[in-house]
Image: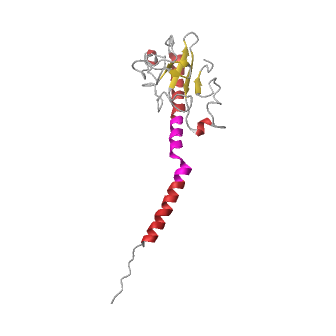
Amino acid sequence: MTSHQGKGFTLIELIIVIGILVVLAAVVVVVLNPAELLKQARDSRRISDLNSIKSAIGFYLANASAPSFVAGGPFSTANATCSFTTCTVPSSGITSVAGTGWVGVDLTSLPAGLKSPLAAYPLDPSNAGTGVGAVNLQYAWKGDTSTLVFKLTAAMESAKFTTSPNDVRANDGGTLGTYYETGSDLSL
């Protein structure tokens, strides 16, 4: 009679290995916190988007022969409640750079030979109009047609950008403590 000894794993060994993998996976999820990483990615995009718009408006103001802002506003990207009290949302063409979008600056009115630095005004990554606590996940713009100054706002949702020392809302110099603000006049 010959004895066969298998070269596989026993059931107990497999259960132990699976248990160890489950514990390691749980630790990785807790340490990395994928939900927070997604929030940080959206917040980074918000900061980048608003800085791109600020640069585009600066380019427009420096190069337009008779720069002007669209009267009215403030305008937002999602609903009628935003950081500037009562906002309106354009009924169509919300991302248009022809002055009819959520930013009241016509980037297409640059002198011949100069193109709009943006193909379209960006929207908030969530653009939900509702969000964390009392803030709305949307972008908002307000401009002063007489002095040609403006302010852009966005809500931050990640702990990285809303807690000290990296709280961009507290360090932006603006007047709204619950929003990140940028522009040429943060007192608007």
Residue 91: x, y in percent? 41, 18
Check if residue 97 falls in the magenta segment.
no
Report the magenta residues as a range: 28-44
Q: 20 and 145: which one is in front?
A: 20
Quadrant holding the C terminus? top right
Residue 73 shows in this picture: yes
Asked if residue 107 is positioned above or below residue 23 in the image, the reply reads: above
Check if residue 43 falls in the magenta segment.
yes
Asked if residue 152 is positioned above or below residue 125 in the image, the reply reads: above
Residue 182: x, y in percent? 58, 25
How many badges with numbers are in the image?
A: 0
> Which secondary structure is most common in the magenta stretch?
helix
Asked if residue 22 is positioned above or below residue 117 in the image, the reply reads: below
Question: Which residue is at the far left?
Answer: 1
Residue 62 shows in this picture: no
* Residue in the picture at 42% in, 21% down: 94
27 lies left or right of 172: left
* Residue in the picture at 65% in, 26% down: 173
143 lies left or right of 4: right
Identify the coloring: secondary structure
Residue 10: x, y in percent? 42, 73
Residue 64: x, y in percent? 50, 14
122 lies left or right of 32: left
Q: Quadrant of residue 93?
A: top left
